[in-house]
Image (cartoon, rainbow, N blue to C red):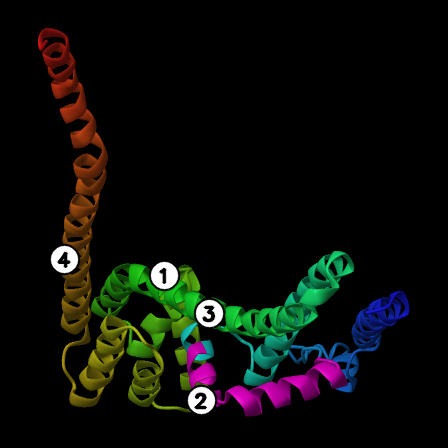
Amino acid sequence: MTTGGWGALLGALAGAGAWLVAMRVVAVRRGHFEARVLRHLTDVPDVAPVRPTVGVQSAAVLLDRVLGGTASVRRRLERAGSPMTVAEFRAEQVTWAVVAFCVASAGAVLVALNSTGRLLPLLVLVVVAAVLGALLRENRLTAQVRAHERQVLAGLPAVAELLALSVAAGEGPVGALERVVARSAGALSRELEEVLAAVRTGTPVATAFDGYARRTGVPAVARFASGIAVAIERGTPLADVLHAQAGDVREAHRRALIETGARREVAMMVPVVFFVLPTTVMFAFWPGVVGLRLVTP
């Protein structure tokens, strides 16, 4: 490729980057109509989020059509406790892909200036980098789901015990839920806050907990929510159910710790067997081998 061709390529990349930056600056400064109006209404708690630019939004729609899996993404966003929508997640995927594409393009241009015969492999590398950028955001969402579910599971015994104490003290299910949510923090408290919001809008308590049991991806939390729903529907003493749920979760934690300890014990044997033991054997037998060589004529 000639010098003029490389100049045109660099100019196109610079122009595309400047266009993306300009569109984003305009969107952030101007804002959407709902966001500009709702910020002046004091009785509305939430302000509408700023929507992505038209170009990013179109690319997000195209990416969603190519990759599919909208229901899976929506399900993982709910399990991660994220307020994002599927469209916003796809827009972030496009952003990650564009960033990876720009970084790979810059490296490819630097390499191609010294070696013009590698143009086709470099183009393939740039495309692969863009795809990997989008897939990396997908993998990041899965990691967020796992981290959020670990936090929810860690807070389940304490929240269950607090609910049991509140119910045993004479509070109703909704009152106990309000008291625990107001006086606790953590991932599970935020999840129960959504359940409480559904109850306040008129959803029956059992139905709200059944919906939470279907949404969550943690089996112990699903059993916890289903147990509360069944106890409310059938009139079972709720405090006993909550104490039993907390005990089951603690027992599951104990088994998980034992299993983790057993796996770590096996992993600790790897350096002992492959590094420490051969070194010990070498130090034990090497002087004898050297002595035999000196004695043997």
Question: Helix, strand or loop at disc 2?
Answer: helix
Mark 2 or mark 4, which has the lower sequence index?
2
Q: Which residue is mark 3?
A: 139
Kind of residue sitting beneath label 3: Asn
Residue 156 place in picture, x, y as percent: 28, 64
Mark 2 or mark 1, which has the lower sequence index?
2
Instruction: In the rendered structure, find residue 84 and report the number of the disc placed on it.
Output: none
The residue lying at 49 percent from left, 88 percent from top is 70
Judge the density around disc 4: few (<14), some (14-19), many (≥20) Cα neighbours within 10 Å: few
Q: Nearer the viewer, residue 292 or 155?
A: 292
Q: CA distance from mark 2 to mark 1?
A: 24 Å
The residue lying at 59 percent from left, 86 percent from top is 63
Q: Which residue is mark 4?
A: 255
Q: CA distance from mark 3 to mark 2?
A: 16 Å
User: Which quarter of the figure is the N terminus placed in?
Assistant: bottom right
Question: Helix, strand or loop at disc 4?
Answer: helix
Q: Which residue is mark 1?
A: 151
Q: Which residue is mark 2?
A: 71
Mark 3 or mark 2, which has the lower sequence index?
2
Q: CA distance from mark 3 to mark 4?
A: 28 Å
The residue lying at 77 percent from left, 78 percent from top is 40
Label 2 or label 1, whichever lies nearer to me, is: 2
| Side of 63 relative to 230 (left or right) | right
Q: CA distance from mark 2 to mark 4?
A: 33 Å
Query: Which contiguous range is marked in magenta?
Result: 51-76
Kind of residue sitting beneath label 1: Gln
Q: Nearer the viewer, residue 254 or 163?
A: 254
Q: Are marks 2 and 1 in contact (CB under 8 Å)?
A: no
Kind of residue sitting beneath label 2: Ala
Mark 3 or mark 4, which has the lower sequence index?
3
Question: Helix, strand or loop at disc 1?
Answer: helix
